[in-house]
Amino acid sequence: MRNKKILLTEKEIPSHYYNIVADMPNKPLPPLDPQTRQPIGPEKLAPLFPQELIKQEVTQERFVEIPDEVKDVYLKWRPTPMYRAYDLEKKLDTPAKIYYKYEGVSPTGSHKPNTAVAQAYYNKQEGVKRISTETGAGQWGSALAFAAKQFGIDLDVYMVNISYHHKPYRKVMMNSFGANVYPSPSNRTESGRNILAENPDAAGSLGIAISEAVEMAAKDEKTNYALGSVLNHVLMHQTVIGEEAIKQMEKAGDLPDIVVGPFGGGSNFSGISFPFLRKNITEGTNIRCIASEPTSCPKLTKGEFRYDFGDTAGYTPLLPMYTLGHNFIPAPLHAGGLRYHGAGVVVSQLLKDRLIEATAHDQIEAFEAGLLFAQTEGIIPAPETNHAIATAIREAERCKREGKSETILIHLCGHGYFDLKSYEDYHAGKLIRHEVTDEEIKASLSQLDVPVPG
């Protein structure tokens, strides 16, 4: 019998998060103050985040210990399984070996609780009573709602308007964990009201939702802000995925030639890839790490490396990142978690240094890949995950043409059982092969009045 499932024991849950900044040959550039355009220190983050998370954001230590209280919550679903996708391999008639690390077994069905639990814990340790946050497709909001309830913290979630209506059961899940959920842009904030004044039917974006959540936290000293991607401490928490994956690949007697993860702001891709990149940097392996994004929001493949705001209203520091411009409003594709204008600072530097790769798929190709995966492996993937599957299929087909038996590892970051509306629209022929034009990107970037990194 073929061994499809590769499991770890509870004792093999990672004891530390991995901080790739410690091993990067070129460290990320500093954030800048929007007014002075001078580098800022961690003290600027104090109104929004607990001190421990600020320390993690700037630390140069290679490993950060995971608190026992966090590991106790992780035990509800970690360690997560890895599978060999034999039936997908057979369908593709490829000599490639395909594995997938499945994070859909978490309480909310995605990888997001890995950082949500840690962030809720550190906020609880500092006596925080309420957190505000944003969510795109709803995975992050659901995860933080679950985590906040574990530690007795109230939560307000600003959910991108198009997803709020496309994915109503994500809202129900957040409400069930005790969170308040508001469509963004909303009338609750100045930034939201400004957007609605210009466009009452605004579909919203992650950048807008971030502005609203940050604004609410900045107004109330008893409220902190939590971010589900982009920042270094968030990416670091997700490395429990890759650390487990390394152990599982060792148990399988294999090592990936290619690691693929979907890309929105960075936490998904970073979680699976950073521990393998450590092997490249420190051990001399040559594992290709590919970030897979939508052609509707191609910040890595078509954006520019610039200083830009992490949100639409300009409340955040200026961050050095690949961006389409903070005013860029992506098309309302169903992969809502990937509809973000910029890329995390650490991931951006890694791409600039060509230590990682990036590719893009339109949503029709992505859904075709997701359906093939569902029909062969029995899991209906989240729309975000479909992009990574599409990349893996593309690489497997290349292996077939070239006669190469390479090993591909996919980060199957979540299931799509709360996203069936998107599959319904696909089957009904309502999805289009959308790709943002170079002219649209140029127009968006032309609005940036920010420094260009030297």
Image (spheres, rainbow, N blue to C red):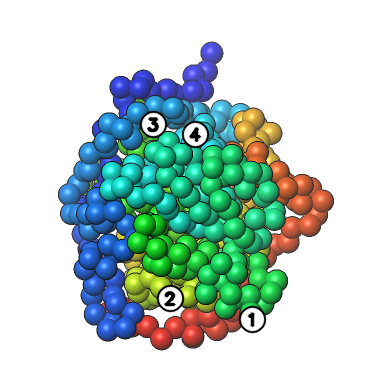
Q: Residues within 10 Å of mark 4 (few under 14, many from 20)?
A: many
Labelled disc at residue 382: none
Q: Which mark sits nearer the N-terminus, 2 or 4?
A: 4
Q: Is residue 375 left or right of residue 337?
A: right
Task: Work out how far the residue at label 2 is from the one at label 1, CA to CA, in angstroms.
Answer: 17 Å
Q: Secondary structure at mark 1?
A: helix
Q: Amino acid at mark 2?
A: Gly
Q: Which mark is residue 106?
A: 4
Residue 229 drawn at (x, y percent): 42, 55
Q: Position of residue 154 (x, y in %)?
A: 46, 47
Q: Amino acid at mark 3?
A: Val
Q: Residue at x 44, y 27 (%)?
A: 76
Q: For the point 45% across and 64% down, which residue is it?
A: 216
The residue drawn where x is 59% and y is 39% is 176
Secondary structure found at label 2 = loop
> Badge 2: how crowded within 10 Å, few (<14), some, or many (20+)?
some
Number of the label disc, if any, that sits on residue 314? 2
Q: Is residue 15 visible?
A: yes
Q: Is residue 238 left or right of residue 1?
A: left
Find residue 27 and report its horizontal and vertical position in percent: 22, 63
| Amino acid found under the numbered disc labelled 4 | Ser
306 or 319: which is nearer to us?
319
Q: Residues within 10 Å of mark 1 (few under 14, many from 20)?
A: few
Residues at circles 2 and 1 in contact by the CB criterion of under 8 Å: no
- Which residue, given by chain and number where applicable, does mark 3 sit on? 73
Circle 4 or circle 1, nearest the eye: 1
Which of the marked residues, 4 or 1, is nearer the chain's N terminus?
4
Amino acid type at circle 1 is: Glu
**Residue drawn at (22%, 58%), measured in percent from left and top?**
58
